[in-house]
Amino acid sequence: MYDIELVIDGKKKKFERNYPPTLANITDAMKIQRIEIEMVNSGKSFYTDEQLDEREKRIADFAVRFWKNQFTTEDVLNGADLKTVNVINKAVEDALGVERTEESDEKKSKK
């Protein structure tokens, strides 16, 4: 259902999760969403380093809890490639109840 690979100590390691998000995951996803809303509503035309760092850390923390502490926040920050980040983002969206349609998925893949 949710498979990721992280490079840890120079080696690719695979992690799996085969069940839907729990209440704790939903709450963690809402924390990420709150940060993103604050970033958009900040009135600035760019995001600050602090905002980006907080968002990055929250996403990594989400992943650690979502995959049941099989790795550390630092492992995510330093070992996640784009494919893994996309899976983490999908897990966050699923925890938030984001509905996907084939049309929206096609639009994303064309960008």
Image (tube, rainbow, N blue to C red):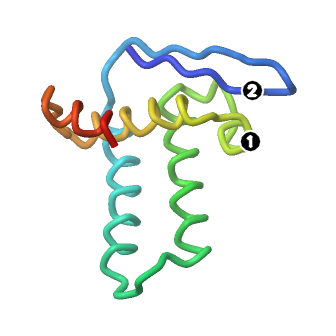
Q: Amino acid at mark 1?
A: Asn
The local secondary structure at tag 2 comes to strand
Question: Counting residues from the N terminus, which is met first, the one under dot 1 or under dot 2?
Answer: 2
Quadrant of residue 50 within the rendered picture: bottom right
Q: Which mark is residue 30?
A: none
The answer to whether the residue labelled 1 contacts the one labelled 2, judged by CB atoms less than 8 Å apart, is yes
Q: Residue at x 53, y 29 (%)?
A: 83
Task: Determine whether 95 is above or below 13 in the image.
Answer: below
Q: Residue at x 51, y 48 (%)?
A: 59
**Is residue 91 found left or right of 106 in the rendered image?**
right
How much space separates mark 1 and mark 2, taking CA atoms? 8 Å
Q: Residue 98, position in %: x, y?
A: 20, 40
Q: Residues within 10 Å of mark 1 (few under 14, many from 20)?
A: some
Q: Which residue in the structure is indicated by mark 2?
A: 7
Q: Residue at x 46, y 16 (%)?
A: 17
Task: Determine whether 110 is above or below 20 in the image.
Answer: below
The local secondary structure at tag 1 comes to helix
How many marks do you count on the picture? 2
Residue most extreme to the front: 110
